[in-house]
Structure formats: structure tokens, C-alpha cells
Amino acid sequence: MEEIMELVQHKSQLIYDLNCVKEYMEAWEFNTYLRDTWDQMNKELQELTLKIEQFSKPPYDEIEQERIELMSKIQNCERDLSRFRQQLEEINKIMSAIRKQNNPVPG
């Protein structure tokens, strides 16, 4: 996690530096040295972006897939629970009816 934070901070600083170089080239002076520097920094930015994506994407995808599977299991269990409650209610009604037949109320 610490490595990701360092990469994100470095990326943020690199974006700032790139923008500064770009503004300088547009406003003041455009030369091949500045262009080469900007190109090199841009390449480094792309590499950083890939590294960050590699850190964050695969685990997220795996966790998301596990979350989806768990949600599906929960929904299945809720359906089963509802069905079991209904079956229990029917059994209770049958047992109540049997008790009434075996123990008629004296009148």
C-alpha cells in the first residue's frame, strides 16, 4: 500500500512538472532540449500509470468477483430461508390440526 501511495505521489508531481515544462515551452521558449525532457517525462508518466493500474486493478477485479459470488449466495440463502419458513408454517398448521382432532374441546 505504501508503494502505491509513493507511485501516486510521484505521478502527481510528474504531471505538475510536465505542465510546467509545457507552459514554459508555449509561453517562452521551445527548443529540442525542453521537448526531449518533456517526452522523457511523459514516457515516465505512462510507465507510472501502468504500474499503478497493475497494483490496483487485478486485486479489485478479484475482490469484486468474490463480492458478486457472495451476494449470489446470500440471495440463494434468503430464498431457501423463505421457503423453509413457509414449510415450517405449513407443518405447524398440520400439527395444530392434528392436536385439535386428538384433543377435542369438551363442550
Image (cartoon, rainbow, N blue to C red):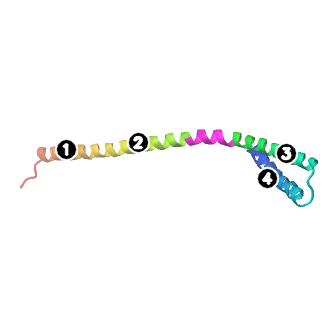
| Eye-nearest disc, 3 or 1 | 3
Of the two numbered discs 3 and 1 on the same chain, state the one appearing first in sequence: 3
Locate residue 32, reporting x and y percent.
Answer: 92, 47
Give neighbour class at mark 3: few <14, some 14-19, many 20+ (Cα, 10 Å).
Answer: few
> Quick check: is 59 in the magenta stretch?
yes
Amino acid type at mark 3: Asp
In this figure, which residue is indicated by the disc labeled 2?
77
Is residue 66 depicted above or below 107 in this figure? Answer: above
Range covered by the magenta-colored residues: 55-64
Marks 2 and 3, how far apart at CA: 56 Å
Marks 3 and 4, how far apart at CA: 17 Å
Of the two numbered discs 4 and 2 on the same chain, state the one appearing first in sequence: 4
Locate residue 84, reporting x and y percent.
Answer: 32, 42
Q: Who's the residue at 76% across and 45% down the image?
A: 2
**Element marked by disc 1:** helix
Q: Who's the residue at 59% across and 38% down the image?
A: 62
**Element marked by disc 4:** helix
Amino acid type at mark 2: Cys
Q: Who's the residue at 19% across and 47% down the image?
A: 96
| Eye-nearest disc, 2 or 3 | 3
Locate residue 87, reporting x and y percent.
Answer: 27, 43
